């Protein structure tokens, strides 16, 4: 543990701050968090803890989600400019227009969406529970899935259901190709290839499993295999290595890096703790409206 980490842990304890971190942030930030997880796990934890002050080491929509679920809490983002390009591919005006064009449809939004968009839709989902959420919806209703078209297509294929897809994607996972998987199989023969369901359907079909980051952690922990190729953002390897001594991990491609997730550093975590900067501010009515589809997701 380095000096910055020690300072953060001391100040966190003194000020009673609860730190959440996503699996994609850098390892030294994961190591000072009270809880590390994927978007579904972090949503649940934010709802359960309801700490007076929560410091969220993740991108903006994640901090917004924590604030929506605990509106009376102070939620701090150490890097307020850490955003999610996919979340910006659906804006509330476009969603409102789509609802007018599809008045009888159920709108399902990936949790990777802004608070303004969540306030306009019916139910949220994450990559870990999207199939269960969609499967629970009436089969005779049109379902509009946003903003990640790749995740939507993977769900539709798995369930055998017809969905209407939004033209959005994760720029990191969308660049993964079948050729990358074929090259990895030559490079690490016999190792299971795990990819994220934000990848294109032909990619998920070519992999051994398409899983959320939480799903990948579970798969690896339970598998008798000793070597794995990981096809998601590189930050997950830190936790995989830490929790699975004796197993080896190989990135599908080293350049699978989210620049926004990497904006969260020990330096700006410490600054946020010292000065309570980067507070997420959302109108009370927006929090109320955006909370409803998240709670529907958590109930499912």
Image: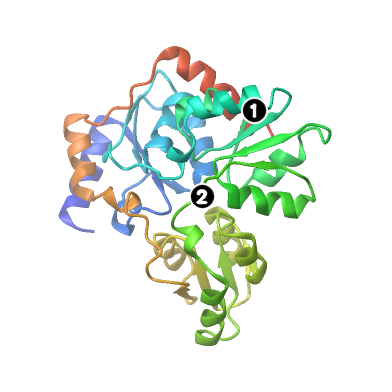
Whether residue 99 sits left or right of residue 159 in the image: it is left
Quick one: SS at disc 2? Answer: loop
Query: Which residue is located at x 29 percent, y 56 percent?
Result: 28
Query: Which residue is located at x 59 percent, y 22 percent?
Result: 292
* Label 2, residues with CA under 10 Å away: few <14, some 14-19, many ≥20: many
Q: Is residue 86 above or below residue 175?
A: above
* Label 1, residues with CA under 10 Å away: few <14, some 14-19, many ≥20: some
Query: Which residue is located at x 64 percent, y 44 percent?
Result: 129
- Nearest the viewer among 194 and 85 is 85
The outermost residue toward the right is: 140
Q: Quadrant of the C terminus?
A: top right
The outermost residue toward the front is: 101
> What residue is pinned by disc 1?
296
Tag 1 or tag 2, which sits nearer the N-term?
2
- Quadrant of the rendered structure where residue 282 is? top left
Quick one: SS at disc 1? Answer: helix
- Nearest the viewer among 7 and 288 is 288
Q: How is the image coloured?
A: rainbow
> What residue is pinned by disc 2?
169
Q: Which label was assigned to residue 116?
A: none
Query: Which residue is located at x 20 percent, y 43 percent?
Result: 268
Whether residue 216 sits left or right of residue 50 in the image: it is right
Q: Quadrant of the N terminus?
A: bottom left
Whether residue 113 sits left or right of residue 261 in the image: it is right
Residue 236 image point, x, y percent = 44, 60
Residue 270 image point, x, y percent = 20, 42
Q: Is residue 64 above or below residue 285?
A: below
């Amino acid at each position: 543990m380095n000096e910055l980490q020690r300072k953060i842990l001391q100040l966190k304890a003194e000020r009673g701050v609860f730190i959440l971190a996503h699996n994609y942030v850098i390892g030294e930030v994961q190591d000072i968090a009270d809880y590390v997880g994927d978007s579904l796990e972090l949503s649940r934890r934010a709802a359960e803890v309801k700490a007076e002050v929560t410091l969220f080491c993740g991108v903006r929509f994640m901090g917004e989600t924590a604030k929506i679920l605990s509106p009376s809490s102070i939620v701090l983002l150490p890097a307020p400019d850490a955003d999610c390009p996919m979340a910006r591919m659906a804006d509330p005006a476009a969603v409102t227009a789509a609802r007018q064009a599809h008045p009888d449809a159920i709108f399902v939004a990936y949790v990777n969406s802004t608070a303004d968009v969540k306030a306009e839709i019916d139910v949220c989902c994450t990559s870990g529970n999207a199939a269960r959420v969609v499967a629970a919806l009436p089969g005779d209703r049109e379902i509009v899935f946003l903003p990640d078209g790749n995740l939507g297509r993977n769900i539709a294929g798995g369930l055998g259901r017809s969905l209407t897809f939004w033209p959005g994607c994760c720029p990191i996972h969308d660049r993964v190709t079948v050729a990358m998987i074929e090259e990895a199989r030559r490079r690490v023969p016999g190792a299971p290839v795990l990819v994220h369901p934000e990848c294109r359907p032909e990619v998920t079909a070519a992999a051994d499993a398409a899983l959320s980051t939480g799903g990948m952690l579970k798969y690896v922990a339970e598998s008798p295999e000793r070597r794995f190729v990981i096809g998601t953002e590189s930050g997950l390897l830190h936790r995989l290595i830490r929790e699975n001594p004796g197993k080896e991990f190989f990135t599908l491609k080293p350049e699978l890096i989210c620049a926004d997730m990497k904006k969260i550093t020990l330096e700006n975590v410490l600054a946020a703790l010292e000065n309570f900067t980067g507070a997420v501010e959302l109108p009370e009515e927006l929090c109320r409206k955006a909370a409803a589809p998240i709670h529907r997701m958590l109930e499912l």
